[in-house]
Image: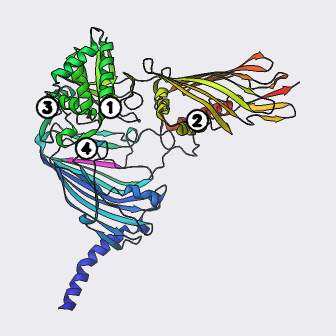
Amino acid sequence: MKFLKALLLVLSTTPLIAQNQIFSVATIPPNLLENANAVIRQKSRVITISDVKLMLITTKRVVTVLNEQGLKDLNAAEYYSNSSKIKSMDATILNKDGQEIKKIKRRDFKENSVSESALISDNKLVYLDYTPVIYPFTMIYESEVETTNTAFIPSWYPLESTNLSVESTMLKINYAKNLGFKFKELNFEPDSKIQKSISDGSLTYTGTQIPAFKYEAYSPAFQNFVPYVMFGLTTFNLEGVQGIASDWKSFGSWMYESLLKNTDELPLETQNKIKQVVGTEKDPLKIAKMVYQFVQDKTRYVSIQLGIGGWKPMLAKDVDRLGYGDCKALTNYTRALLQSVGVPSYYTVIYGDSDIRNLQQDFVSMQGNHVILSVPINDKMVWLECTSQTNPFGFQGDFTDNRYALVVKPEGGEIMKTQEYTPDQNTQISKGSYTIDALGNFKGSVEITSKGTQYDNKVSNETKSQDDRIVFYKNYFTHINNIKLTTIGFKNDKELVEFQENLSFEAAAYATATKGQLLFPVNAFNQSSNVPQRYRTRNNPFEIERGFYDHDEILVSVPEGFSVEAQPENFELKEKYGSYKIEFITVKKNQILYKRTYQLNPGYFEKQEYEAFRKFRETIARMDNAKIIFTQK
């Protein structure tokens, strides 16, 4: 009997061993190893939507990790909450030859609450935390997750990240036809390695032999050029609330009726208080500013992700009582306050990120990850970031600028574009002077005024410690060795949305002083030294998401008795990517005025243009480092 049992065990495990050995690293095609830190050997996901309140997601993922950088591509993790449950979850680790070395059960996975100091959530994350003994290795991961939420059907990315190749990937969606299933393909090329098949109540995508690609400088945001597919339902369920997504107008009406209606009640005491704050003011813009400041002074940000609270804002009266809320709650609270003083405003759903990401105008579904407030004033929309205690009124910065968002009105939704900061609004104006003594030592001061997204880049310096400020400016003026900051002062004008830096510093031996000559780079305050990387073969398009405009006027002085022996020529460059101009104006024999203007234009460009852009930037870097020679006579 013992012999028979052993024989049966061997026979039953032999097919599994043989199956796993197909995942030997030696069987990976050479072209899939190029530029790859990991290889998806096989990925299959089956999504079955059998009812408006039932979606089952079954996943099998086989990943060969070639090195430490590839660990991030394991992606063996699932969330669960009161509306979602993990039905099964396990993993198997194979060595480079495809032989099993470890079995990991559901109980061996780690689990974390998503809640953090500024986040309250009923979501739990269950994930594989595996530290390999040796590379390469392969993971086989399988899971089954069931959810009542059908508002969010996972998008399908055949290629998930850079430096990751794909041997085989498949997605199949089975759906009940009465729910109005829909999908949208983005960034698909005619010669795509992706196949699609549609049958009655089913959609399948497959992809094979997709090589990895490296990240390249100035590549667009991943979702802006890599193929992927979005999915949605016309009739869906969100935490027990049934929704309709047939068009943006009706979708906005559903959001208003189901998520916003009756959430804006305020205590009478607060209504009276905000009316006292406003007083006799009639200008809606000034009233909105007063209300915004009231919210900033009274509240702080805490994210709430409990059940429908992950999508439905807290009651305005609760925010008023507690003094905190998430983006939804604080936006809705500001809306309620404005309403109480006669100024209309609208709850607005958006993708918040430093990479510009739009809501898809022609695909109606639950999209976005953030909420702001839009206030129509004098035929113009003012956009308010209600989670910030420091933002100037109406300033968006690079988190919500220049993208399409859903404005939710009582009569329905409307897709609108937020403010775009053009180069002439993203300005940095520098005025200053410096002197070089006979030994080459530097002493100077400069006033730098920044607006638009350049304001956004600088304003955080105001709240830094003195030590952190010094570190920042040493990095900012990295071309000046031995720099010593003597004055660091700021003026933050929130009315004009201007940030002014007043700096003075000195440095030993900035100039090379030899035999009565002083040689030094004339541009001491605003050198653009970063030259985009050169690629023998550029594979990706490139994008400049935001442009800017810099103008510098700097007075340069050397001791009496010195005069210019050699200086750069005045220079001007104009390309589609921007423009650049420098001028040298003689004030005295020992004094020149250096004027510099540099504008970078936003745009999306094909890969064939990258080298021309790189040379444009290379020329600017060279001219910014141009040196001048003063000689003592």
Along the line of sight, the residue nearer the viewer: 552 or 155: 552
| Gap between marks 1 and 4 measured at Cα | 16 Å
Between 207 and 518, the one lying in front of the other is: 518
Quarter of the image where the N terminus is located = bottom left
Q: Nearer the viewer, residue 148 or 323?
A: 323
Q: Vertically, is 210 above or below 149? A: below
Closer to us: 274 or 303:
274
| Label pair 2/3, CB-CB below 8 angstroms | no
Residue with the mark numbered 1: 387
Near mark 2 (Cα within 10 A), the count class, few <14, some 14-19 or many ≥20, is: some
Give the side of residue 171 with respect to residue 436, left or right.
Answer: left
- Is 190 a magenta residue? yes
The first of marks 3 and 4 along the sequence is: 4
Three-letter residue code for mark 2: Tyr
CA gap, disc 3 and disc 4: 22 Å
Q: Which residue is mark 4?
A: 120
Q: Report, in whole angstroms, how far the alpha carbon at label 3 lies from the one at label 1.
A: 23 Å
The region drawn magenta spans 189-198
Q: Is residue 619 above or below residue 48?
A: above
Query: Can you give x and y, in whole percent of width and height, for residue 331 in the image?
Result: 26, 28
Tag 1: amino acid: Thr
The quarter of the picture where the C terminus appears is top right
**Are the residues flagged by discs 3 and 4 in contact, CB closer than 8 Å?**
no
Which amino acid lies under the numbered mark 4 shown in the image of this protein? Ile
Distance (Cα) linking label 2 and label 3: 50 Å
SS at badge 3:
helix
* Residue 374 point in image, percent of width and height: 29, 22
Residue with the mark numbered 2 = 473
Is residue 474 rendered to the left or right of residue 160? right
Judged from the image, the secondary structure of the residue bearing numbered disc 4 is: strand
Label 2, secondary structure: give it. helix
Residue at image mark 3: 258
